Each structure stands twice: as structure tokens, then as C-alpha cells.
Image: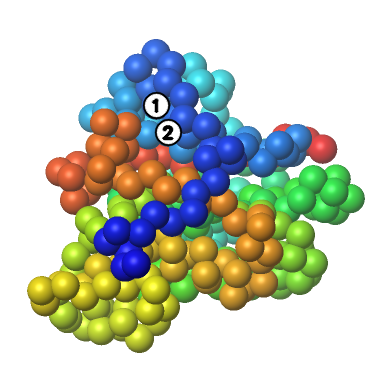
Amino acid sequence: MDLLSRHLQCTPGNFEVTERDGQTVLEFLPGASFAEVRLFMRGKFLNATGGRAGLIRERLIPWLGEPLPLVAPHQVHGVSILEAAPENVLPLTPQADGVLLASPGLEASLRFADCAPVVVMPSEEWAVAGTPWVLLMHSGYKGTVQNIVRSGLDEVANRFGADAVRSASAWVGPCIGGANYPRTMEEWTARGLEVFHAENVCEMEGHFYFDIAGELRLQLMESGMDQDRIFVSCLDTFKSRDICYSYRGGDREDRMFLHACLRAV
């Protein structure tokens, strides 16, 4: 069965979509006492913000309370991972597509409209015994081709040790589905054909369809994560434009807002 008709195994019990006051939110549900991670999707708090992180965070004060210093990098579809540190908070916007947060005094964020939010967190036992952390990554087609997942997990391993990766869980949030992501042949398409596993690519009538979520799941496994702790939302941003912003669905400026903060353990 090809990716245009197959249904990737989803794990909805690890995500919960809620709506309050006209704002849709996806809650990541790791059962963690040390972190809060939410994806703010389509809704009145994000509409007409143009994806500007500072403005979005101000709008979300009713949800999140008064803001702490916020890390919100300029995303360039690369693989750089930014440390959440005071020298990297707004109004500075260093180029990066990932943020590693290990301080309860800061907040981390990324923005999305078809690319996949990827969240990695350690086990509760690791966080309590060691240093709690959250890794956020922005992995669209180009980020997946370049394997930002490996860059992010290498950063975790370098900072906290390989056991931090082995103990962790990962969540792949809403992104454009393979059936809605056709590409014609060009340089980046050719690179994708070299990198993506065959099960996550389909060719039809001169177009190539890439399953980003399916490829991210394999990349997380190949980077040392247990497949039983990798959770995929399977929300297609293009098909779910009632609750998601989708660039290919016409949203050229507004973006979903992935937000994370740590609690003191």
C-alpha cells in the first residue's frame, strides 16, 4: 500500500486537541511534572499576528500568564539547534530551527504552517534525577532531508549523555500529509529521493509525494530512540485547515506557535 492510501499508525492518546475562547490548542501529554508544551493552532489569539513570536506571546497572556524571556529564533529550514540562554532571547532572533531548553527561567518557541513540530523530552525519572530539558525542532521537508532530528539528538547527547536520548520520548505534531505534498523534480527533490526511505515516497504522473511524518519517525528511531516512545499526531495541516494554519492551504503569514517552559523540579 503506497503512502497516498496508507494510514500511518497514530498515537492520539498522547495528544489532546482542545478549544477555549475561540483558540484551538494541541496539548502534548507526556505526563511530565517538569514541563509544559503546547501547540497553539488556528484561533483568535493567533489570527492576524503574522507569525510574530513576541506579539503571539503577548496575546497568549490569558493562557500562559506573564511571559518570561522568550527564545524565538529566525527559522531558515536548516539544522542548527539554539541553546535557550539569556543571550538568545527576544528581541534577538538568531538563525536556528531547534531550541534546547534546560532552564526554568526561560521560554522556548517555534512557528509552523505545514512543517512538523518535533518535541523530545526525557523520562520523568531522568528529569528528577538529573537536569530536566525539552528539545523543540522545526522539521519541514528541507529540515527532514537534512535530518535536523539527528542534529538535535546529538546536541542532547553531547550535553547530557547518550542515556538522555535513550530514556526520552518524542512527539511529531501536525504537518502536511504525504498525499498533499507533491513535488516536481529539482535539486531538493533529488536530495529527498536520496534520503527518504522508500516507504515514505511515492511517484505518480511526474510528481513525487513525501511523507514527512513517516520519515521523521524513522529518523528518530535511527537516532537511538525507542519506537514505543515515538508518538505521531497524524493531523494533516492541509486537510485540517479549520484548526491548523497551512501555507499550502493559503496561510501566507499566520503561523501555529509551539511553546515550552520548564517547571522547577
Marks 1 and 2: in contact by CB < 8 Å? yes
Residue for point 43% across, 16% down: 20
Q: Is residue 69 above or below residue 224?
A: above
Q: From the top left corner, tell me how far across and down residue 145 is, in percent.
A: 38, 75
Please indicate, yes or no, whether residue 65 appears anywhere in the rendered image: yes
Residue for point 89% across, 50% down: 129
Q: From the top left corner, tell me how far across and down residue 105 is, in percent.
A: 68, 39
The disc placed on residue 232 is: none
Q: Which residue is mark 1?
A: 24
Indicate which label's residue lies in the foreground, 2 or 1: 1
Q: Which residue is mark 2?
A: 40
Q: Is residue 137 above or below residue 1?
A: above
**Amino acid identity at mark 2:** Phe
Q: Quadrant of the N terminus?
A: bottom left
Q: Quadrant of the C terminus?
A: top right
Q: Sequence-wise, which precedes: disc 2 or disc 1?
A: 1
Quarter-wise, where is residue 116 in the image? bottom left
What is the crowding at mark 1: few (fewer than 14 residues within 10 Å), some, or many (at least 20)? many
Residue for point 26% across, 31% down: 242
Q: From the top left corner, tell me how far across and down residue 232 is, in percent.
A: 50, 51
**Amino acid identity at mark 1:** Thr
Q: Disc 2 to disc 1, how far (Cα)?
A: 6 Å
For the view shown, which residue lies furthest in the left direction?
205
Q: From the top left corner, tell me how far across and down residue 67 is, in percent.
A: 54, 29
Q: Name the side, left or right, on which 204 lies relative to 213.
A: left
Mark 2 lies on a secondary structure that is strand
Q: Tell me how many marks there are.
A: 2
Residue for point 67% across, 41% down: 30
